[in-house]
Image (cartoon, grey):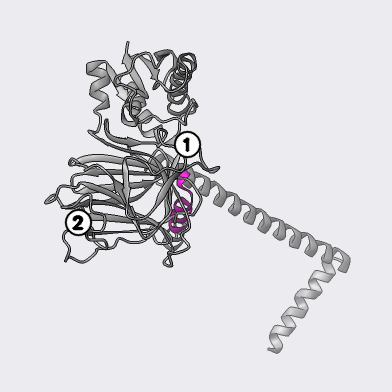
């Protein structure tokens, strides 16, 4: 230890002999500053490299479609869950991708209650409860207001449903002060031996069927006879709210049934409609609600064949509000299919022709039909990037009906959009 101390003293002496104390400190300061500068440059370069690598990774993921690739699988799972929650809470985020409902081509029942007087009970319906035709500041048109949640409401005339069909209606759930379980309403598709007897099998009407319940507890139950247990589906979001308008769309394809609320697919059940039964009743019960524009149709349209082969496609899947020309969002699947046909056949040109029913005067209907055809063209061009030069438009108003304008069903047939190959 003494030898080391002597050596250290000798080294210091040599340094002080060659340089003064001030010079020594100055050299030490310069060396320290150089080291600090070099370390700072190294750290800055590391940060830059990390940023560049991250940018390259993100660009590569976007090009390969692997947007969710992360180094930490736990973070990736959490991010996926957050995206799912955001999508569930915002139905608009899944429009045009998950919303694929296209209504049936042949209308077998329609009622918008325009022929009914305010305060009357609609002639095409029956109930074990009570209800009346009303108007509301929430939405335009006339609505059937079911006022007794303990009753059941169905069509007055017997109904025969085929293997494949669609059901659509607008609905405004309402609060029922007598209903303690909080359900706004239920909607069922049933097979029953007594389609005009609303009391028969009140808890489980008929012999087979499926029931959808809405608002505070969205679920479905299905049964194949009076003694089989109910099978409940998992709860789904979003819950319906009272005094708010919704569009309900249902598609039945033999054993499969899909149900949409607005643009969101709420249920897709592959094997719940038993083919051992013929379904002959649709029914509202277990709560109060207002509904309108109730439409049942069969025969999914072969849009591609009709337009390309036959040269004429009549569409009932393009919707407008009464006396308006703005295309409603539930029309997008049908317009999207037209756009796909045109993109697959770039040499094809079409003419869009609007038609109305006979309500209103001739001049107004002619103008409305032309404006509606122009709106469909604008949607094809602006929403689906179809070239405007390939599309002509026209309107015929009420001048070319395909049915007499003497009933709600026939008027619905006359309100249409035609696509003609030119």
Mark 2 or mark 1: whose residue is earlier in sequence = 1
Q: Answer with left or right where residue 143 lies relative to residue 160.
A: right
Check residue 206 in the rendering and tell me which mark sits there, or answer none. Answer: 2
Quadrant where the C terminus is found in the figure? top left
Q: Residues within 10 Å of mark 1 (few under 14, many from 20)?
A: some
Specify the farthest residue to the top. 422
The percent position of residue 182, horizontal first and vertical second, equals 44, 63
| Residue 23 quadrant | bottom right
| Residue 122 quadrant | top left
Q: Nearer the viewer, residue 370 or 35?
A: 370
- Residue position for label 1: 141
What residue is drawn where x is 73% and y is 84%? 5
Look at the image and say whether residue 30 sits in the magenta stretch. no
Q: Is residue 61 visible?
A: no
Q: Kindly report the distance in space between the C-alpha atoms of the residues bearing marks 2 and 1.
A: 33 Å
Determine whether 65 is above or below 130 in the image: above
Q: Answer with left or right where residue 102 lies relative to residue 393.
A: left
Quadrant where the N terminus is found in the figure? bottom right
Look at the image and say whether residue 85 sits in the magenta stretch. yes
Q: Nearer the viewer, residue 12 or 179?
A: 179
């Amino acid at each position: 230890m003494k030898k080391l101390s002597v050596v250290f003293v000798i080294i210091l002496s040599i340094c002080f002999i060659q340089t003064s104390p001030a010079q020594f400190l100055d050299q030490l300061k310069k060396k320290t500053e150089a080291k600090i500068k070099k370390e700072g440059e190294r750290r800055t370069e590391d940060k830059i490299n990390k940023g560049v690598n991250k940018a390259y990774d993100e660009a590569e993921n976007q090009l390969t479609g692997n947007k969710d690739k992360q180094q930490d699988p736990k973070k990736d799972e959490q991010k996926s869950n957050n995206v799912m929650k955001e999508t569930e809470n915002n139905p608009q985020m899944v429009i045009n991708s998950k919303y694929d409902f296209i209504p049936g081509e042949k209308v077998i029942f329609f009622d918008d209650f325009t022929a009914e007087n305010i305060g009357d009970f609609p002639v095409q319906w029956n109930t074990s409860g009570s209800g009346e035709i009303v108007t509301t500041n929430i939405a335009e048109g006339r609505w059937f207001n079911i006022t007794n949640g303990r009753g059941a409401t169905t069509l007055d005339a017997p109904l025969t449903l085929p293997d494949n069909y669609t059901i659509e209606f607008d609905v405004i759930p309402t609060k029922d002060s007598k209903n303690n379980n909080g359900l706004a309403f239920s909607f069922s598709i049933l097979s029953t031996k007594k389609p005009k007897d609303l009391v028969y099998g009140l808890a489980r009407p008929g012999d087979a069927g499926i029931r959808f319940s809405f608002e505070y507890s969205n679920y479905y139950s299905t049964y194949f006879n009076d003694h089989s247990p109910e099978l409940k589906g998992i709860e789904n979001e979003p819950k319906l709210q009272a005094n708010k308008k919704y569009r309900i769309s249902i598609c039945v394809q033999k054993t499969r049934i899909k149900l949409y609320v607005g643009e969101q697919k709420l249920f897709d059940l592959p094997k719940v409609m038993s083919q051992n039964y013929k379904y002959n009743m649709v029914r509202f019960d277990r709560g109060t609600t207002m509904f309108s524009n109730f439409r049942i149709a069969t025969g999914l349209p072969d849009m591609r064949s009709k337009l390309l082969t036959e040269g004429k496609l009549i569409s009932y899947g393009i919707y407008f509000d009464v006396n308006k020309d703005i295309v409603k969002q539930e029309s997008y699947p049908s317009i999207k299919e037209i756009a796909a046909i045109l993109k697959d056949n770039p040499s094809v040109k079409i003419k869009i022709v609007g038609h109305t029913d006979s309500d209103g005067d001739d001049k107004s209907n002619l103008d409305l039909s032309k404006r509606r055809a122009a709106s469909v063209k604008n949607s094809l061009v602006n929403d689906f990037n179809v070239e405007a030069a390939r599309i002509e438009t026209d309107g015929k108003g009420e001048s070319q009906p395909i049915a007499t304008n003497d009933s709600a069903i026939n008027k619905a047939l006359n309100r249409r959009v035609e696509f003609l190959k030119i």
